[in-house]
């Protein structure tokens, strides 16, 4: 194809770039690092960036996502459709996710969780999409060497994930020769109305909103429940009616957190910690303390099959038999969503607090304060012993105040027992 025809098609593909996208696209640097909020339009920008290089003959381009599935879901169908519709593509390899163009250029989708598939090649350009969720070695040890002999360029674009290597790269890009850095919120991207952003502000905890919608880098000192502080500790002196109890099953340490609904929030008023115990003993302890109250228990979903006694009944059955209403998802919800639900209730993006803990709940306070992620990961540390009580809190809060409201609650949960 004639160069000028290709270029004309290229600048008119997909939809026009927004002003922020155009600012990034018009740069004259070899490398660009972009911190962008959700729905900023990373996919369209990436397609334009890829097309700019692919319009020249015999170019090799990689689009890299954290996983193969993400790469396929995010961009494969769109870029394949655009290339074939405009007669750029010659053939598509569905198993390898590679497009061969009529001018000899190739566009390949790759995943950071399979770095060996990217070694031993020479590249003219690479897009690292959501690179904050990749290992730094994906860039330094795998992709950077592939660009050297062709002096290829790269676009790093992601929502932040704390002060990890993407933050370091973004900071480096502000001053390094032939690098440029950008930061754009979801709203500035022009694809999401302000009303939707404000709705998300009300739905999310502060850090998640700042990270996902404002593209801010936040340091939580690795604490999982970063929104918990002294302002979350408050004595409860109100009425005690129906009780809501989160429960984590564990023989060495069984934990229950006891709360009451206060308006559109929750106040944890008591905690129960039993060592070398079982579900029947936990049920009896709740009855000893609160036998005159209606109790709804929100246990670990695994208790629908798990047994901590020798009587042949599941943990959920034992709780129902003791007279409690049992509510739990049919399967485990996302741990990340549960953590976000707790943080949002502790303090949402508008600064409102709706989750409080009575100062007598020493174990709950300690665990919420000290439970951390494993070093350099988003995996909660389950070796510290702080996870049992925080799991009990998480089961309770995420059921009552989920980040994502299910379309059909009947399909999501199982509930049985009295009243």
Image: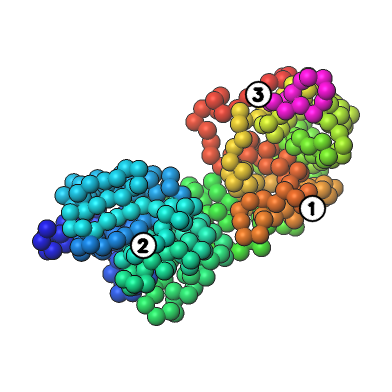
Find the distance from the CA under tag 3 to the CA under tag 1.
31 Å
In the image, taking residue 101 as reference, residue 145 lies left or right, namely right
Q: Is residue 252 visible?
A: yes
Which residue is outermost to the front? Answer: 120
Label annotation for residue 175: none
Residue nearer the viewer, 47 or 94: 94
Residue depicted at 86% across the width and 29% down the height = 281
Q: Position of residue 390 (x, y in %)?
A: 72, 45
Part of the protein shown in magenta:
304-316
Circle 3 Cα neighbour tier, 10 Å, few/some/many (<14 / 14–19 / ≥20): some
State whether the magenta stretch is mostly helix, strand or loop: loop
Residue nearer the viewer, 330 or 358: 330
Residue depicted at 48% across the width and 67% down the height = 140
Q: Position of residue 25 (x, y in %)?
A: 30, 66
Q: Earlier in the sequence, mark 3 or mark 1?
A: 1
Q: Earlier in the sequence, mark 2 or mark 1?
A: 2
Dot 2 corresponds to which residue? Answer: 121
**Secondary element type, mark 3:** strand
Q: Position of residue 3 (x, y in %)?
A: 13, 63
Q: Is residue 24 positioned above or below 317 on the image? A: below
Residue depicted at 39% across the width and 75% down the height = 179
Q: Is residue 303 positioned above or below 390 on the image? A: above
Q: Is residue 372 positioned above or below 305 on the image? A: below
């Amino acid at each position: 194809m004639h160069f000028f025809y290709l270029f004309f098609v290229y600048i008119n593909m997909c939809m026009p770039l927004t002003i922020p996208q155009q600012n990034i696209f018009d740069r004259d640097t070899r490398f660009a690092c972009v911190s962008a909020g959700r729905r900023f339009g990373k996919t369209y920008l990436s397609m334009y960036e890829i097309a700019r290089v692919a319009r020249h003959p015999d170019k090799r381009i990689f689009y890299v996502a954290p996983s193969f599935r993400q790469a396929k879901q995010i961009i494969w169908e769109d870029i394949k459709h655009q290339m074939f519709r405009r007669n750029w593509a010659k053939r598509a390899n569905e198993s390898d996710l590679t497009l061969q163009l009529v001018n000899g250029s190739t566009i390949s989708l790759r995943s950071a969780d399979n770095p060996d598939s990217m070694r031993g090649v020479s590249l003219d350009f690479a897009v690292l999409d959501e690179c904050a969720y990749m290992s730094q070695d994906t860039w330094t040890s795998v992709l950077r060497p592939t660009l050297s002999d062709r002096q290829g360029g790269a676009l790093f674009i992601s929502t932040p994930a704390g002060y990890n290597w993407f933050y370091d790269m973004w900071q480096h890009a502000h001053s390094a020769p032939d690098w440029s850095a950008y930061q754009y919120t979801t709203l500035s991207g022009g694809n999401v109305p302000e009303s939707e952003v404000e709705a998300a502000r009300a739905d999310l905890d502060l850090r998640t909103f700042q990270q996902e919608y404002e593209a801010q880098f936040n340091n939580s000192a690795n604490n999982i429940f970063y929104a918990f502080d002294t302002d979350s500790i408050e004595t409860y002196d109100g009425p005690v009616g129906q009780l809501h109890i989160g429960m984590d099953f564990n023989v060495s340490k069984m934990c229950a957190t006891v709360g009451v609904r206060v308006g559109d929030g929750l106040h944890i008023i008591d905690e129960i910690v039993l060592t070398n115990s079982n579900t029947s003993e936990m049920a009896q302890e709740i009855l000893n303390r609160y036998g005159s109250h209606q109790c709804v228990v929100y246990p670990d979903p695994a208790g629908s099959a798990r047994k901590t006694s020798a009587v042949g009944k599941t943990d959920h059955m034992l709780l129902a038999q003791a007279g409690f209403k049992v509510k739990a998802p049919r399967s485990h919800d996302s741990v990340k969503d549960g953590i976000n639900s707790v943080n949002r209730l502790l303090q949402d993006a508008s600064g409102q607090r709706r989750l409080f803990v009575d100062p007598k709940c020493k174990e709950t306070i300690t665990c919420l304060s000290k439970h951390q992620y494993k070093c350099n990961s988003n995996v909660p540390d389950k070796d510290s012993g702080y996870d049992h009580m925080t799991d009990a809190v998480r089961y309770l809060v995420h059921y009552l105040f989920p980040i994502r409201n299910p379309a059909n609650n009947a399909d999501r949960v199982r509930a049985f027992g009295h009243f």
